[in-house]
Image (tube, rainbow, N blue to C red):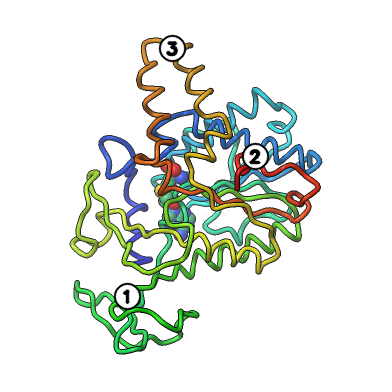
Amino acid sequence: MARAVAAYYARRDPFGAAGDFTTAPEISQAFGECLGLWTAVLWQRMGRPDPVLLVELGPGRGTLMADALRAIAQVMPGFRAALRLHLVEQSPVLRAAQAARLADAAPTWHDATEGLPPGPALILGNEFLDALPIRQFVRRGGAWRERFVEGGAFVEGPAEDAPPLPDAAPEGAVREVGEAALALAAGLGARLAAQGGAALFLDYGPAESGFGDSLQALARHAAADPLAAPGEADLTAHVDFAAIAAAARAGGAVTAGPLPQGIFLQSLGLVTRAAMLARARPESAGMQLSAAQRLIAPEGMGRLFKALALCHPGLRHPGLPPLPGFETA
Ligand code: SAH
């Protein structure tokens, strides 16, 4: 699965109407702007470190970061001057798109978070965790078996070197474990606790760990057979937010959320921002408002998508106001 994901992104730009799927930053510029303002508030709370790393994991076309940087430059020029942009991206095609879009900010690219330089950091990741590989385990006769892909089909075999799994589960239950995402969260948790800063992840998945097969392939905006054409469809799985948060806390960070994306974006002012955009550009007013609605409405992306923050313990404790967007968490 890991190879299929890497191969998929390495060869194409999958976003937008002509591609396989679309994401929040491609739907409304207000999304990236709100996330940029989130990092600006955190930078102030950190005591305005200069320099500071601004990092995006899996930046796609660079749209979120372009919108974030524009908003940051407007409201907090000091932060814009202090930040050094670092992008974690493996796809050569998408790195080229990011280079064109973000040339003004002279980004540095990395294959993985381990390559980031040390120092206080503000980190964003939208629909990044769901693209990381998962393992699937199936409950059979009171024990766990692992599901593998062999000869273009799913087969079950012994669960060797299995991560911790629940002791009890109904027959046939599927448990998914995203070991790469958990290792990433633990590593970032340790990094943020030692060097300062915060990370914000937006992705889709339940707030509580559970059972179920969420492996999904998307091609041309429709569900596809995950095994039909390896590397030709986008493979994703639901993110286990509770497990990610626990891994980050074990690393030493403090967490906020997961909170439904709709609530998070509304408290960051996304609706107000979309209304401003609609007034400024009456010809696209309807589009601006329906885009914001799609990101926030429970039947759109507002409920299944969640926001989760990790940060240094000094940035979130009872003596401080809640992290922006997490006031109700
Ligand atoms: N954040 C963007 C793109 C989401 S798609 C948006 O919201 O539109 C997932 C992104 O993660 C792509 O840029 C993909 O190339 C990148 N990616 C997937 N697996 C990765 C990995 N293991 N390491 C680094 N980047 C990865």
Q: Secondary structure at mark 1?
A: loop
* Residue plotted at (48% across, 23% down): 274
Task: Name the side, left or right, on which 212 lies relative to 80.
Answer: left
**Residue 137's x, y, as percent?**
36, 77
Q: The disc labelled 2 sits on which kind of residue?
A: Pro
For label 2, the residue is 324
Q: Quadrant of residue 40?
A: top right
Marked residue nearer the N-terminal end (1 or 2): 1
Q: The N terminus appears in which quarter of the rendering?
A: bottom left
For label 1, the residue is 173
Q: Secondary structure at mark 3?
A: loop
**Residue 91's x, y, as percent?**
42, 51
* Residue plotted at (42% across, 67% down): 210
- Label 3 or label 1, whichever lies nearer to me, is 1
**Residue 326's x, y, as percent?**
61, 44
Q: Residues within 10 Å of mark 3 (few under 14, many from 20)?
A: few
Judge whether 323 appears above or below 67 on screen: below
Judge whether 197 appears above or below 245 on screen: above
Marked residue nearer the N-terminal end (2 or 3): 3
